[in-house]
Amino acid sequence: MTAPPKQPPRLSPGAARLSAALHARAERATLPRATVMEAFTAALLGAARSDNSRTALATLLEELSDTGVLRLPHGQAGKWDAGRPALPGHIRLPAVTPPKPTPAATRRSYRPELDWAQTARLTTAHCEVVALINRWFRDTSNRLELRAPISLRERSYEIFFQDEKRLDALISGALFAPGRLTLEQLGTYREPPPLAFRQLGDGDTLLVAENSDTYATLRDLLTPNPGRTKAVAFGSGRAFEASIETAKEIRGIQRILYYGDLDAEGLSIPARASVTATQCGLPPVEPATALYDLLLNHTSTPGQPVSGERAHTLTTWLPSRQRQKTHEVLMSGRRIAQEATNRNQLAGNAVWFP
């Protein structure tokens, strides 16, 4: 029985763009910090210029490390800087095989959209992909109606002989680095998952809950008197990293507040989503601090231990008064689920209202 093909790691939009920029610069498997910073600026200019650029980069590097796209150095001495959160002196892209220059005799003639490929250092696999895309550009050059935008998997099915997932795997690689291929050129787009929300009032704040029961509780308790809250949304875990883009449909949002579990996943989700929000012109995703104050008064339960350096990165998203206690929870291998602040507790304590 043939094993199903291995699927690429699911990456947040920001991590996918950073991965592509890093791979395009990978003449060797090991990239120094200067190259990482250059790739970050090229791929995510808005995040790189923001006040929390260091946190954004550290968050994305952790995500790429968790999914096996890159390796971060182990240990501290000389391998990480002294900032908070710390940034590595180098990274390693384990899957990288340095490409060899294409011999002049075997170079192809590419369409104008692929001029960059004439001089790029591409692997054999890359050349095969570019050849298929080149053919699509050629076949549609005089039929612009065939380039009318369709969704990513529909376009992938068309270009890659009924392989609807091929573009999913490619957009985080070197071919989609800044200055190379774009989804716009291919007449396609990533369709973000919809953000489920309930509009409550005329305020300026979007309040997002990680989990469904807490979403329902916040929705019901805020409905009679929403205050600054315009809408309450269900983040649905990691889906929020991409669905945040659709918050643009909620007019008048000036603040995005997030409330999730106090564990590694619950803290990394809003930090990653904040990078996406910054890139698409939305406000950054901030913690619903009053709700986290209440949550930190509850007893923690067993979870997964987190390294000291990662705990520093994760807690940077929180205000300073909440970092130390949260750091201790993470380091002890424990967590606090947001459901600890249940409907009865929140109904009797209006201090948490946004």
Image (tube, rainbow, N blue to C red):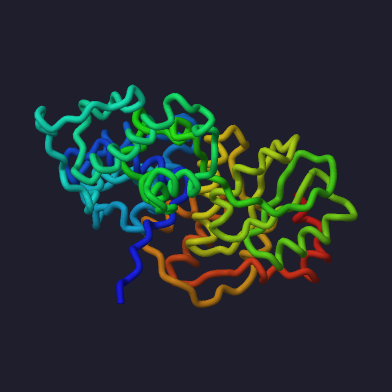
- In this picture, is 23 found above or below 314? above
Question: Residue 204: x and y, percent?
Answer: 76, 39
Question: Residue 122: x and y, percent?
Answer: 21, 37
For the point 68% across and 62% down, the residue is: 294
Within the image, what quadrant is residue 345 found in?
bottom right
Question: Residue 247: x and y, percent?
Answer: 66, 43
Left or right of 194 in this view: 342: right
Left or right of 149 in this view: 123: left
Please state, as top left, top right, bottom left or bottom right, where the N terminus lies in the image: bottom left
For the point 66% across and 51% down, the residue is: 195
Question: Residue 12: x and y, percent?
Answer: 47, 49
Residue in front for this viewpoint, 41 or 179: 179
Left or right of 317 in this view: 348: right
Q: Residue furthest right?
A: 224
- In this picture, is 302 found above or below 233? below
Residue in front for this viewpoint, 149 or 122: 149
Tell me if I can see residue 84 in this picture: no
For the point 36% across and 52% down, the residue is: 64
- In this picture, is 44 found above or below 70? above
Within the image, what quadrant is residue 221 found in?
bottom right
Tell me if I can see residue 217 in this picture: yes
Residue in front for this viewpoint, 225 or 25: 25
